[in-house]
Image (tube, grey):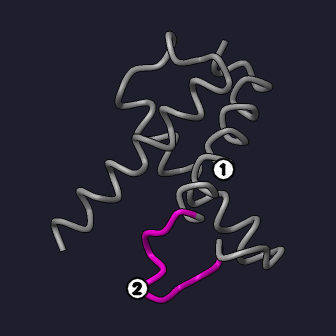
């Protein structure tokens, strides 16, 4: 159980870091912001793309699909969308 949380935090940090590089906010964000944006972005992507639109494996719910290449991609996409929303609201500059 603890290991799955550690992996989720590390994957969230990775997704947030990649998204911050793509959106050019990496210098403004710290590691904690990358982790939070990565995790929230992954949840956002799962809700929008997986549950609402049914696109790809973003909505996969079984434990075997918990960590996959596509889930990381959806996490990065969700993080980019979240950063774009935060920039539009001028929370991030």
Give the camera-side residue of 92 and 20.
Answer: 20
- Residue, x 80% and y 25% (percent of image)? 88
Residue on which the image places disc 1:
78
Residue 66 appears left or right of 82: left
Q: Position of residue 71 (x, y in %)?
A: 56, 64
Point out the image quarter for the N terminus. Answer: bottom left
Q: What residue is drawn where x is 65% and y is 21%?
A: 91
Residue 2, picture quadrant: bottom left
Picture quadrant where residue 22 is located: top right
Asked if the stretch drawn in magenta spans residue 2, the answer is no
Q: Badge 2 is on which residue?
A: 63
Q: Nearer the viewer, residue 87 or 21?
A: 21
Residue at far left of view: 2
Q: Is residue 45 above or below residue 81?
A: below
Q: Earlier in the sequence, mark 1 or mark 2?
A: 2
Q: Residue at x 57, y 60 (%)?
A: 43
Q: Quadrant of the C terminus?
A: top right
The residue shown at (51%, 12%) is: 28
Residue neighbourhood size for the residue with mark 1, other residues' Cα within 10 Å, grouped as few (<14), some (14–19), many (≥20): many
Main SS class of the magenta portion in the image: loop
Q: Can you name the residue that lies furthest to the right here? A: 53
Determine whether 93 is above or below 50 in the image: above
- Span shown in magenta: 59-69
SS at circle 1: helix
Q: Do callouts 1 and 2 mark residues in contact (Cβ within 8 Å)?
A: no
Relative image position of residue 10 (x, y in whole percent): 32, 48
**Height in image: 91 above or below 43?**
above
Where does the image place residue 4, in percent across and percent down from the top left? 25, 68
């Amino acid at each position: 159980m603890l290991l799955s949380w550690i992996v989720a935090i590390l994957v969230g940090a990775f997704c947030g870091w990649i998204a911050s590089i793509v959106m050019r906010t990496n210098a403004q964000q710290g590691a904690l912001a990358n982790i939070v944006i990565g995790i929230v972005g992954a949840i956002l992507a799962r809700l929008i793309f997986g549950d609402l639109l049914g696109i790809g494996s973003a909505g996969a719910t079984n434990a075997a699909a918990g960590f996959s290449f596509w889930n990381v991609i959806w996490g990065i996409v969700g993080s980019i969308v979240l950063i774009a929303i935060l920039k539009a609201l001028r929370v991030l500059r």
